[in-house]
Image (cartoon, rainbow, N blue to C red):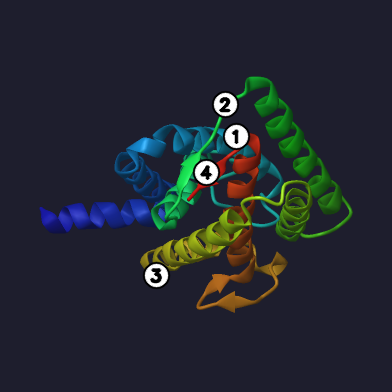
Amino acid sequence: MIQSLYSHLMSILESQPYLVNSLILLLICAVGVVMLQSHRRLIILSSLLSIPFCFYEFVFIPEYWTPHQGNQLLGLADFVFSFATGGITWILVLFSLKQEVTYSWKPRLFCRRYLGGSISGVIFSLCLWYMGLNIMIAVVLIIIAGLIVLALRFPRLQKLSLYGALSFGIFYFVILKLMFLSSSVFPLHWNHNNLSGLFLWGVPLEEILWALGFGSIWLRFMAYVFDVKLKS
């Protein structure tokens, strides 16, 4: 019975590694929410606001990778992945910070900052992609530009960017490496012809750059949207 269950689980892992990876991230996110009850609302809001970016997947397929079976461009795994990573960035930092984190909910300010920042970032990255730049490199460049703009206009909370980049970058690298070791199919989802060809212990450099950038910009962006403050 145990052997049969193991074989079944391995079959699912080999056939749907991206979905399995996303569900593992969702489980980690759920555990973090339970353990950080005082920050539950901030984590969940961050997760929900990350979901719309999963529609960005359309420009990554098939140029960057093909994570779904057949000709599917968007699936459940994309929504789960976006939700989970949006929350995990905060969870990792909140565990490591020794300061109290406060935030405010101002609907008009939220709409202006979230929609303005999101739409402008997407448009500029799509423009770079349309001009012939690799889509992941375009995204990384826009992340860097966004960090510079936020640092100049709102110099507070630079610590969040650093903590976010390091914590999420290391976390995502470990998770992805473990998934690569567990599934021989998962690494084949990436279009290696369009990658830089540089790897760190088998993980594409583009994925590492994205993780460092996302961990940094998402925390900084959410701090901007919710007017987050750190108290000693």
Q: Which one is in front in this view, the residue at disc 3 or the one at disc 1?
A: 1
Q: Is residue 164 visible?
A: yes
Left/right of residue 137 with respect to residue 25 in the rendered view: right
Q: Nearer the viewer, residue 130 or 150?
A: 150
Q: Earlier in the sequence, mark 3 or mark 1?
A: 3
Query: Mark 1 — residue?
Result: 226
Amino acid found under the numbered disc labelled 2? Trp
- In the image shown, does 180 or 24 lie closer to the viewer? 24
Q: Which of label 4 and label 1 is nearer to you?
A: 1
Expressed as whole percent of the image width and height from the top left, the position of residue 23 reads 39, 45
SS type, badge 2 = loop
Q: Which residue is mark 4?
A: 86
Residue 73 appearing in the image: no
Whichever of labels 3 and 2 marks the residue nearer the N terminus, that label is: 2
Helix, strand or loop at label 1? It is loop
Residue 181 place in picture, x, y as percent: 39, 70
C-alpha distance separating marks 3 and 2: 42 Å
Q: Secondary structure at mark 3?
A: helix
Expressed as whole percent of the image width and height from the top left, the position of residue 31 reads 31, 45
CA neighbours of label 2 inside 10 A, class few (<14), some (14 to 19), many (20+): few
Q: Position of residue 169 (x, y in %)?
A: 53, 63
Where does label 3 land, which residue? 181
Inspect the image, locate mark 1, and give the three-letter code of the amino acid beneath it: Phe
**Mark 2 = which residue?**
105
Q: Residue at x 63, y 39 (%)?
A: 53
Q: Are marks 2 and 1 in contact (CB under 8 Å)?
A: yes
Q: Nearer the viewer, mark 4 or mark 2?
A: 2
